[in-house]
Image (cartoon, rainbow, N blue to C red):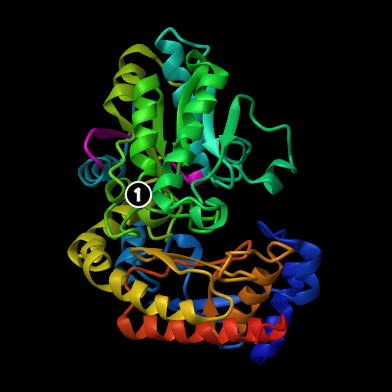
């Protein structure tokens, strides 16, 4: 059987039985699945043998790169010793215990307790229950509202999708969770109008205070936000935004949740986006880079304010998952964090490859489609626009982005289209030469897109 025959065989089975996430399955079946068979470093390979530079680190998660033998061995050794046991019924396993200590060491001050789950969605489901139970125990059960942002992404379960502010998700599977509301996002490039970024950051942040006063401060339990909105298009807030958000949360005694699922574990040039933006969260959900995607694991870091109440006043917290603190996943996460520490990947992103990535990506700013190049560490958002001078978007949002995403694949680089914003988030181990190659392939894809829509 040659490679083409194998591919056709796998595509046929996939079409018959597999419903893909976030996919128009009928369209996929017409086009055929791209079957990924192997990966190494920052490259993935399909069943035809074509290589792609993975500019998205899988789904924002393969921070240490593909093919790390140490992570495979950590899983293998743990599975031989204790492949599974639960953390219910007065039980725990040593990898989960050790990981809890390490997470308390690397997360921002005051986050010393960990609740384990398996995905970012589950972590955010956990956050909802913690927030509402906290206020109930504090004698304020009416504080059920959680304020989020339009175009935010916090997962795809009912609770996660409700917290997120994406209209397309809200239109499917509703009704959404009650008492979740959304304010404007801090997207200066697309929504800032004539304001400078600093002015707009304050305007966007003060939407939180307006919403609190509209609902009544005695009804609001928490505000949730990603330090940088990832799936929303890598929306990097102006410098004035997070300080003002925190001032407002403190003024009204609102819990602050920093969703670190994408920004965590070195992506922004610090261990967490909260470090980069000096955010002091009460709750911090995280996942993805925690194990570099090698095994599913997530967690919620719980600050002392909330932990003290949940531990000492709650009694049984009736929440958890079969695989919470799974020993093999925890062992892989421990080894992953060891690699990040020993290879100084966080410092490398901050001092070396992050600045180089920004410098090289900015060479795309002269392209006729590129409105801006916005980066922090190893995460970037590039808006494609109809008119660079006026920041005018295209008439049919998402159409040009989809064309460009497909052109990227054709040119051997994986970038994601979030509407008409092209985003990149490569593994933290990417080299200077591989950054050069990423930018070269991205430019070729942008050129192909421009030609297809008559802009070049």
**Is 116 a magenta residue?**
yes
Q: Quadrant of residue 37?
A: bottom right
Let me know if residue 19 appears in the view.
Answer: yes
Left or right: where 261 falls relative to 109: right
The residue under the point 59% across, 70% down is 384
Position of the C terminus by quadrant? bottom right
Q: Quadrant of residue 430?
A: bottom left
> Which of the pair 183/136 is nearer the observer?
183
Residue 285 in the image: state x and y as whole percent.
41, 41
* Tag 1 residue: 239
> Which of the pair 67/419 is nearer the observer?
419
The residue under the point 57% across, 21% down is 214
Residue 128 in the image: state x and y as whole percent.
50, 29
Residue 385's place in the image compared with 140, above or below, is: below
**Most distant residue in the top direction:** 139
The residue under the point 28% across, 66% down is 349
The residue under the point 46% across, 46% down is 200
Q: Quadrant of residue 281?
A: top left
Residue 171 in the image: state x and y as whole percent.
74, 42
* Segment tinted magenta in the rendering: 108-120
């Amino acid at each position: 059987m040659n490679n083409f025959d194998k591919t056709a065989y796998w595509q046929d089975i996939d079409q018959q039985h597999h419903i893909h996430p976030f996919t128009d399955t009928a369209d996929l079946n017409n086009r055929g699945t791209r079957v990924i068979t192997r990966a190494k470093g920052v490259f993935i390979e399909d069943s035809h043998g074509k290589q792609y530079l993975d500019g998205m680190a899988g789904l924002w998660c393969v921070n240490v790169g593909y093919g790390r033998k140490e992570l495979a061995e950590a899983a293998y050794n743990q599975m031989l010793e204790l492949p599974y046991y639960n953390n219910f019924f007065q039980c725990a396993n040593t990898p989960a215990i050790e990981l809890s200590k390490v997470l308390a060491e690397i997360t921002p001050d005051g986050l010393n307790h960990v609740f384990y789950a398996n995905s970012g969605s589950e972590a955010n489901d956990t956050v909802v229950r913690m927030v509402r139970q906290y206020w109930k125990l504090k004698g304020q059960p009416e504080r059920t509202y959680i304020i989020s942002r339009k175009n935010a992404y916090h997962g795809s379960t009912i609770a996660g999708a409700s917290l997120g502010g994406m209209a397309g998700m809200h239109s499917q599977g509703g009704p959404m969770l009650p008492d979740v509301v959304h304010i404007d996002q801090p997207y200066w490039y697309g929504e800032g109008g004539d304001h400078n970024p600093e002015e707009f950051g304050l305007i966007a942040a003060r939407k939180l205070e307006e919403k609190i006063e509209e609902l009544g401060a005695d009804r609001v339990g928490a505000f949730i936000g990603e330090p940088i909105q990832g799936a929303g298009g890598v929306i990097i807030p102006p410098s004035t935004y997070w300080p003002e958000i925190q001032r407002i949360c403190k003024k009204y005694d609102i819990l602050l949740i920093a969703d670190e699922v994408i920004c965590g574990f070195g992506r922004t040039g610090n261990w967490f986006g909260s470090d980069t933006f000096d955010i002091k969260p009460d709750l911090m959900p995280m996942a993805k880079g925690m194990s570099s995607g090698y095994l599913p694991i997530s967690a919620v870091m719980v600050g002392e304010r909330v932990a003290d109440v949940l531990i000492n006043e709650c009694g049984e917290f009736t929440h958890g998952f079969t695989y919470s603190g799974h020993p093999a996943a925890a062992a892989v996460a421990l080894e992953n964090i060891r690699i990040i520490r020993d290879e100084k990947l966080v410092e490398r992103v901050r001092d070396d490859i992050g600045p180089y990535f920004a410098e090289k990506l900015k060479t795309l700013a002269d392209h006729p489609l590129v409105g801006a190049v916005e980066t922090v560490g190893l995460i970037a958002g590039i808006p494609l626009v109809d008119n660079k001078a006026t920041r005018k978007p295209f008439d049919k949002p998402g159409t040009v982005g989809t064309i460009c995403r497909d052109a990227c694949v054709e040119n051997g680089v994986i970038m994601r289209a979030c509407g008409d914003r092209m985003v990149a988030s490569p593994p933290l181990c990417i080299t200077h030469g591989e950054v050069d190659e990423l930018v070269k392939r991205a430019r070729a894809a942008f050129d192909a897109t421009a030609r297809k829509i008559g802009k070049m």
